[in-house]
Amino acid sequence: MDKLIENINISGEIQIVIFIILAILVFSSIVLGIWGLFSKSKMLKELKTRTKSWWIMCTLFITATIISNVITYVCIGFLSFAALREFYSVIKLRKSDRAGMLWCYLAIPVQYYLAYRGWYELFIVFIPVFMFVWIPFILVLQGETKMIMSSMAGLPTSLMLCVFGLSHMAYLISLPEIDGFSAGGKGLLLFLIFITQINDVMQFIWGKLIGKHKILPKISPNKTWGGFIGGLISSVFIGYLMSFLTPLNHWQVIVVSFFIAGVGFVGDVVVSAIKRDMGVKDMGQAIPGHGGVLDRIDSLALTTPIFFHLVYFFAY
């Protein structure tokens, strides 16, 4: 597919999708701005929040992919750092857990270096195997056993959620080239981000239109079966239309899009459950008025590894 702008080092397929997304964002922002002149409804406020989140994600993606692959790794690595920092600011940890927290932060550059080098075997076991063994041992060395079980559960979980999951976005860029597939890792990254985020929007819209029966009222009272199923079907359909960003055939794209939508819901409610347990509305205030980084990428934290390994299984 021909490029819209020849001097930019991304494929024509990705350029066209980015152009469409930017056009949708500009149109949506104008419509919501006009709507805001006549209404102050809660739905309007939520739609503005989600639109601003899209602007941030789109800007980060375009900036990172246009400049260089290294910048892409650094940007995603910074997301992991910010998400991990927010996680530790919310959950209840002991003073003796600081050494374990330090090792969790140090795991970020190691994990992303493994992704950068494309060392799949080490990348896939470093956190869930080596760090899973090392972090509890570090906690034991502090000599404090009170509430150590909670720390042994919380710190490895933070690594899996904020670092291991998100680092798969970086590894998408390191995947080997496939003959006839020009979009490459950046195309896969764009597909993943777009379907994950559009699923969130579709679930919200369908939930407002036909959502009556709540799924988990004690965890996320706004989640309904109508919204979930509507978002699932919409995401699969949109994913099918965007299959040119992947090396997958039609039925494989349908399967992958289905899992992205379903697991995106899981990521959202898992983080919601953590926030309810800690008694907070948002994980942070990195985006003033719109919560923290983890609030915006909670779905991505779980959809990314699922998407990566499905694509790896089908195409690599």
Image (spheres, rainbow, N blue to C red):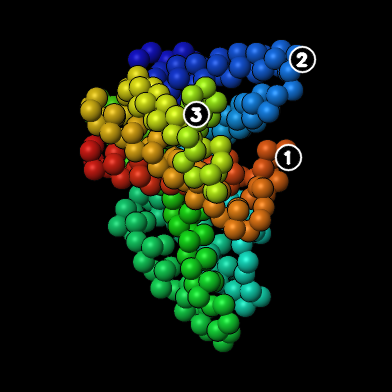
Q: Residue furthest right?
A: 37
- To which residue does mark 3 refer? 211
Q: Amino acid at mark 3?
A: Gly
Q: Are marks 1 and 3 in contact (CB under 8 Å)?
A: no
Q: Is residue 110 above or below residue 12?
A: below
Q: Residue at x 49, y 50 (%)?
A: 270
Which is closer to the viewer, label 1 or label 3?
3
Image quarter (top left, top right, bottom left or bottom right) of the C terminus:
top left
- Viewer-proximal residue, 248 or 86? 86
Q: Is residue 147 above or below residue 64?
A: below
Q: Amino acid at mark 1?
A: Pro
Task: Locate residue 36, reporting x and y percent.
Answer: 73, 18
Assign a secondary structure to mark 2. loop
Q: Amino acid at mark 2?
A: Leu
Which is closer to the viewer, label 1 or label 2?
2
- To which residue does mark 1 refer? 288
Whichever of callouts 1 and 2 sits on the residue coming sooner in the sequence is: 2
Whichever of callouts 2 and 3 sits on the residue coming sooner in the sequence is: 2
Q: Residue at x 67, y 52 (%)?
A: 280
> Can see residue 81?
no
Assign a secondary structure to mark 1. loop
Q: Bin the neighbour count of mark 3 within 10 Å (Cα to Cα): few under 14, some 14-19, many 20 and up.
A: many
Q: Residue at x 43, y 68 (%)?
A: 131
Task: Locate residue 260, reporting x and y percent.
Answer: 38, 37
Q: Residue furthest bottom?
A: 143
User: Mark 2 and mark 3: span between their CA atoms?
Assistant: 27 Å
User: Mark 1 and mark 2: span between their CA atoms?
Assistant: 22 Å
- To which residue does mark 2 refer? 37
Which is closer to the viewer, label 2 or label 3?
3
